[in-house]
Amino acid sequence: MRNMKTLLFLFLFIAVSITGYSQTTATIAPKDTAHYWTIHGQNTLLINQSSFKNWAGGGVNAAAANIVLDYDFDYKKDKLSWDNKAILGYGLSDVTGSGWRKNDDRLILNSLLGYQAAKYWLYTFYANFQSQFTNGYDYSSNGRTLISGPFAPAYITFGPRFAYKKSDNFRVNISPAAGRVTLVDNDSLSSIGAFGVKPGSKSLFEFGASLDAYYKINIAQNISFENILKMYSNYLSKPQNIYTDYTANLFMKVNKLVTVNAGVELVSDPLAKIPITNNGITAYHSVLQIRQIFGAGLTYKF
């Protein structure tokens, strides 16, 4: 029964999104019927490799592979809109002497129901789920230390919003009353109070304000720069400690299928404690988290 209500909410969230997808076959078939649904997405496979032999400058052999599935299911009729997005990303890298380690692990589901109030303004209600597929480890000390896992953490955020949407490439969503549930469904992590839960507890509820912003610009032909910002402040405890997640992606299109992608993600999470070892002593601290991705590969858009 633990976390049953939260898992039920997630199940309903996914089921509603899938139901919306299944309806597309009925709406897009007849040519004389209005097309309310728009479905598009992209599948990306990135490869990165470097090797050295008798190289005076030194270097370490390394290889990496990443796959990202990014899908949008959007509904629009008159003043009503319903935008759904699913992002699944996973990647592994192999460095000589270290073995295979993951460099990306994301499961993101987002749904936004909106009603147009003015030319660029909407009243909205949103739900967001975010977690990962596999365990995550810290390798800075001897051996490895478990720091995360599937549903540990998982974040569910929901609430009313008002949004400014100039175009698909520029939008800002603000919620003054946002609920946020953090799940830590791992006994060892919950026992130490990871991600803000009380030691031994599996979940944490927060109520506060959130902001999401998206901006994408075309720098040159076939080169675009994407910015994604997420912020959350908990009214119930230390609202000045703001969760911040900023992602910057650079997309360079070589031809219809081949792309070169570079990205960096910066996360400041006051509740995420990372093990830091100094002089043989390990302590848990909230520090800036940084993830970088660079590679060339294949991208199929539809």
Image (cartoon, rainbow, N blue to C red):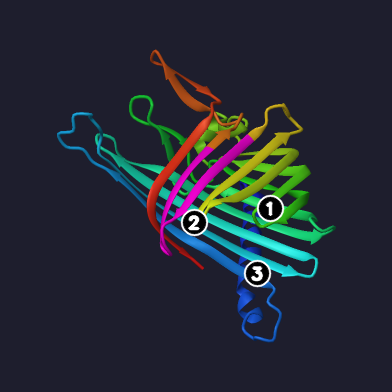
Spatial CA distance of label 3 from label 2 is 32 Å
Q: What's the magenta bit mostly, secondary-structure-wise?
A: strand
**Secondary structure beneath label 3:** helix
Q: Nearer the viewer, mark 3 or mark 2?
A: 2
Boundaries of the magenta span: 244-265
Q: Are marks 2 and 1 in contact (CB under 8 Å)?
A: no
Q: Is residue 194 above or below residue 215?
A: above
Which residue is the site of mark 1?
127
Q: Which residue is mark 3?
A: 20
Point out residue 263 in the picture as x, y percentages from the top left corner: 48, 43
**Disc 2 to disc 1, how far (Cα)?**
33 Å
Residue 189 spot, x, y in % from top left: 51, 34
Residue with the mark numbered 2: 222
Q: Nearer the viewer, residue 223 or 247?
A: 223
The secondary structure type at the circle numbered 1 is: strand
Q: Residue at left 28%, top 35%?
A: 98
Q: Indicate which label's residue lies in the foreground, 2 or 1.
A: 2
Q: Is residue 188 visible?
A: no
Q: Quadrant of residue 57?
A: top left
Residue 220 is a magenta residue: no
Say which mark, if any, is on residue 85.
Answer: none
